[in-house]
Each structure stands twice: as C-alpha cells, then as structure tokens.
C-alpha cells in the first residue's frame, strides 16, 4: 500500500495526489504537523522535514517532482513513462532512495 505523508493545503502534496489519481493508485494519507519541529516521522524517514513524502513498500521518496516521476515510471502508461524520463533529465539525480 502506498502512503503519502502530507500537509492538506500544500500545493506540492496536491500535485502528488493528482498524480496518484492519474495512475489510478489507491493510497493512505498521514497528515503531518504544520510545525516542522514536530515532523518526527518525516525526519526519521528522510533526514529532512519537508513534505510530501511517499512510501511505497520499502521505497521512500520525497520532493514532489521526484515522487511524480517515480509514480509515472512505476505505475504509468507509455506517455507517463516518457514524462517520467523528462523529469529525471531535469532533476539529474536519482528518483528513489531505499
């Protein structure tokens, strides 16, 4: 099961939620505290305190564009795979940290 750690009104979290809908994936949501000093789970998983964070099995990804690329690459159709490759080129860093 995919889990999204998010802030409800965060635009980057909204982008990830839309991508999850685009690739037709069910997911659970964990609302994280607005106060970054209280985001212990996020820090424990990623070493930083920003949202969104996506957990897919043993895979943990943070930063919305990396999450979008991962979802399109993992669950998307041919067009979405192509978009994932474009995002990867733009980022020039690995998408997934396990």
Image: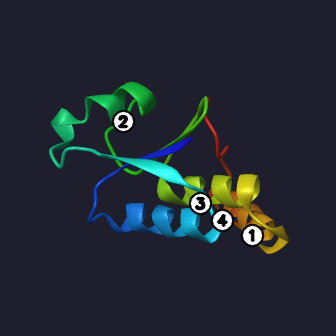
Label disc, if present, on residue 23 of the rendered structure = 4
Q: CA distance from mark 4 to mark 3?
A: 10 Å
Question: SS for tag 2?
Answer: loop
- In the displayed structure, would residue 92 be above or below residue 9? above
CA neighbours of label 4 inside 10 A, class few (<14), some (14 to 19), many (20+): some
- Residue 56: quarter of image: top right
Residue for badge 1: 80
Which sits earlier in the primary sequence, circle 2 or circle 3?
Answer: 2
Residue for badge 3: 68
Name the residue furthest bottom: 79
Which quarter of the figure is the N terminus placed in?
top right
Which quarter of the figure is the C terminus placed in?
top right
Residue 9's x, y, as percent? 26, 66
CA neighbours of label 2 inside 10 A, class few (<14), some (14 to 19), many (20+): some
Q: Residue at x 37, y 25 (%)?
A: 44
Question: SS for tag 3?
Answer: helix
Question: SS for tag 1?
Answer: helix
Q: CA distance from mark 1 to mark 2?
A: 28 Å
Which sits earlier in the primary sequence, circle 4 or circle 2?
Answer: 4
Which sits earlier in the primary sequence, circle 1 or circle 3?
Answer: 3
Name the residue furthest top: 44
Residue for badge 2: 48
């Amino acid at each position: 099961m995919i889990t999204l750690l998010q802030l409800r009104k965060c635009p980057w979290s909204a982008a990830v939620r839309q991508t999850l809908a685009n690739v037709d994936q069910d997911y659970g949501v964990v609302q994280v505290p607005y106060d970054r000093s209280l985001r212990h789970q996020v820090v424990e998983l990623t070493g930083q305190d920003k949202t969104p964070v996506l957990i897919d099995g043993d895979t943990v990804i943070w930063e919305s564009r990396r999450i979008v690329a991962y979802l399109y690459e993992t669950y998307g159709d041919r067009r979405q795979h192509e978009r994932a490759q474009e995002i990867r080129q733009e980022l020039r860093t690995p998408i997934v940290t396990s």
